[in-house]
Image (cartoon, rainbow, N blue to C red):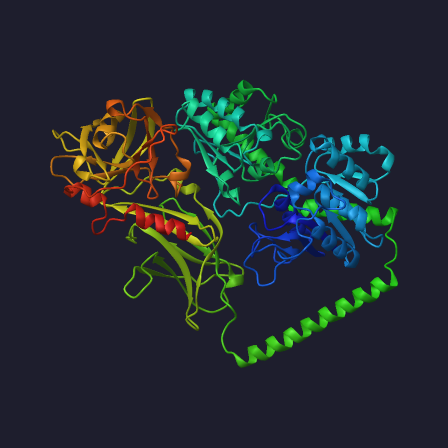
Amino acid sequence: MKISFLLQNAYGIGGTVRATFNSAGALAERHDVEIVSVWRTHDRPCLPLGGKVRLRPLIDRREDASRNDLGSALLGTPSALVPAAEAHGAGFDGLTDRRVARFLARTDADVVVATRPGLVIYLAAFGRRHYLRVGQEHRVYGTHEPGIRAAQDAAIAALDAHTTLTEADAATHRRHLAATGTPIVALPNASPPPPLTTVPDGEAPLVIAGGRLIPVKRYHLLVEAFAAVAAAHPRWKLRIYGRGHRHAALRARIDELGLSDHVFLMGANPSLATEWAKGAIAAVTSREESFGMTIVEAMRCGTPVVATDCPHGPAEIIRDGEDGLLVRSGDRDAVARGLLRLIEDADLRRAMGSAALRNAERYAPEHIARRYEQLFDELNATSPPAPVPFDRRVVAGAWRARAATGRTLRRAVLGVRRRRTTGPGPLRPEAACSVNAAGDLVVRLERAGMPGEAFTLTAALRGSDGPGGELIEVPLGRPETDDAPWTAVLERRALPLAEGRWDFHVVRADDGARRRVASSAVEQQGLLSLEPAPGAPFSWWIPYATVKNNLSVRTWRRPAHAEASALAVDATSCTVEGALYGARFAPGQRARLLAVPRRDPSAAFETDVTALGAGRFRFRLAYSRVLEACGGGEAETVDLVLRLSEGAEPVRVARVIGDVVDRKRTDVYPAAELPGPRGGAAVSVRPRFTAANDLSLVVRAAPDAGYAGRSPGSPASVTNDAAVLMGAPGVVTDETVLKSARAD
């Protein structure tokens, strides 16, 4: 059977794209499956797509493509079929009318599945009777704009079947569409097993939430509920993954509640599986959920979910009290009670996590694929499609013949090339990387992209690729079986990696071919319970996937390190608590905090540091002192270091330990607005982590002060301490790391 899924944009990130990729990949194990994307906006899909699924775009909107459709006269003209609200939101226009109509007229598929209202409307208008026409609803019936709802309802009447994600929503559709006679069937989304090589333990004090930052997700409710959690259990943190227009409002609410050191907006992540695995609890506080893909994904990692009992998905997925908790929708206190119940009962949390792992198996792609097959078989039995028209059979036959001829020619050409060329095939290394209990990196490279007999894994310090640059080589252990991966272990204690970003390549011994390693998964959960190795120097590694999905590792290596583990702000100061690594507070010596303005390091000043025992420390930095050192309202960045004793080397204050590569984006704190000195314009002072995760204070004109600042002047003098901070030999400066970050 040939099955075509019609998507608006398979190159984007979203629940519909993810769900379609999962279902298509499972069906492709036994069928000929293609995804037809109306738009092509990138060279490759952002989400992983099974190798057996073909991807076919209809319109190319890539500006740098040699043959794109940006010059079409129909681009941007009104659609003749799709309601304006849907057309505007999804980019449907006169060009999509023409291209989708052409595809639906010429396809030789046995089944075409349309995945959003505009595509359902197209399928009803342009579809043919010689294939099954199936619509899909990825939202809840009553959530569409009335014009979209009416047009889709009319289109559903012309289809062979329409599917929803839950039985509850299917019942709603049947009530509204009883007169159409179109079968309405519940088909939930498929969720594959997470790409994990280590078993999550669920012990980190983390609550995880994920999804677009939009009103329907009601993250403000979750943030407000977490205030009670943070008050009772300060060690627990909340991470919210996603992006959207509510980001600024959520940020403001977090700051208002004083939760900046407890609630973190992590940004978008194309693969949340490794993040669910880090959490002890997942949280969903939506006003409505058409299904609840994040619930299933969390459960498949063995993470119990606290979810509001909203329409329609959570109650069909979670078995309340067995594998998660359902709490009253819209009730902040109920959400807080649910979270606290699992936080305070570790045995219950573990039992629910185990049950979640078992029960979520029913959403495995192979099970959902069988439900698709059952639907298609039933439709073919009760109302078989019309015979394929003669002209369509001729066209399809000719197309298949051309395709077969093309494959034969390609095989022949490739065969000739293979006979002329000695050696293995192309090298396309792809790896899963995890952190073991010792903090070592375990890199497992898939066999499929590694034709050859012997390989070496290399890591190169970014910016030092030339002759004499920093490079390490780790032999890859030969797999014991044909399906086992090539494996390398980078031992943290044995490899003194310099501070910076290291990029991984594979070098093949047969011909010297060298290729960058792509990332299939990066498992960082081992870092959450890992302690730095004792003694000096301080070293920390965080593996990560770059924005181009290549495997890299961010490293820190310093003679000593002061970890800013907790940070609190008020209207006049910030207070930092932390721990010292690679050095000790000298008995009888008074440790001091040194604050160094970058513009004029000679204006550096000191303040007291309190040693709390066992290497712990605390200091409070008054913003008034910062303004004095910065010359009043000047725009400035002030770096913070500890001086453990008179004449000792300064120790940079930073937040490095853990699993977050870029704290600058996630660990954000509110600014305090202060009057400028001598009646000058108001200024703001904000703690901020740099691109190297070092802690600084940023002084700026207050938003309404209209202060433009002045150009930097030359410092009158530079202290030895400031010289270290400004990039003395052996020190990686902010600018160096920032350039590396941009390169990602």
Residue at the outermost top position: 333
Question: Is residue 604 at all visible to an observer of this figure?
Answer: yes
Dividing the picture into quadrants, the one containing residue 103 is bottom right
Q: Pick whichever, 630 or 47, lies toward us.
A: 630
Along the horizontal axis of the image, is 217 left or right of 737?
right
Along the horizontal axis of the image, is 217 left or right of 123?
left
Determine whether 528 is above or below 104 in the image: above
Residue under the image location 57 percent in, 19 percent down: 331
Residue under the image location 39 percent in, 33 percent down: 668
Q: How many marks?
A: 0
| Residue 387 spot, x, y in % from top left | 88, 57
Question: Is residue 53 at all visible to an observer of this figure?
Answer: no
Determine whether 721 is above or below 577 in the image: below
| Residue 684 spot, x, y in % from top left | 33, 28
Dividing the picture into quadrants, the one containing residue 470 is bottom left
Q: Which image quarter is the N terminus in?
A: bottom right
| Residue 156 spot, x, y in % from top left | 80, 40
Residue under the image location 35 percent in, 28 percent down: 705
Residue at the outermost bottom position: 420
Along the horizontal axis of the image, is 742 left or right of 451?
left
| Residue 526 spot, x, y in % from top left | 41, 42
Q: Pick whichever, 563 or 148, lies toward us.
A: 148
Q: Pick whichever, 252 or 385, lies toward us.
A: 252
Determine whether 542 is above or below 399 in the image: above
Along the horizontal axis of the image, is 417 left or right of 441?
right
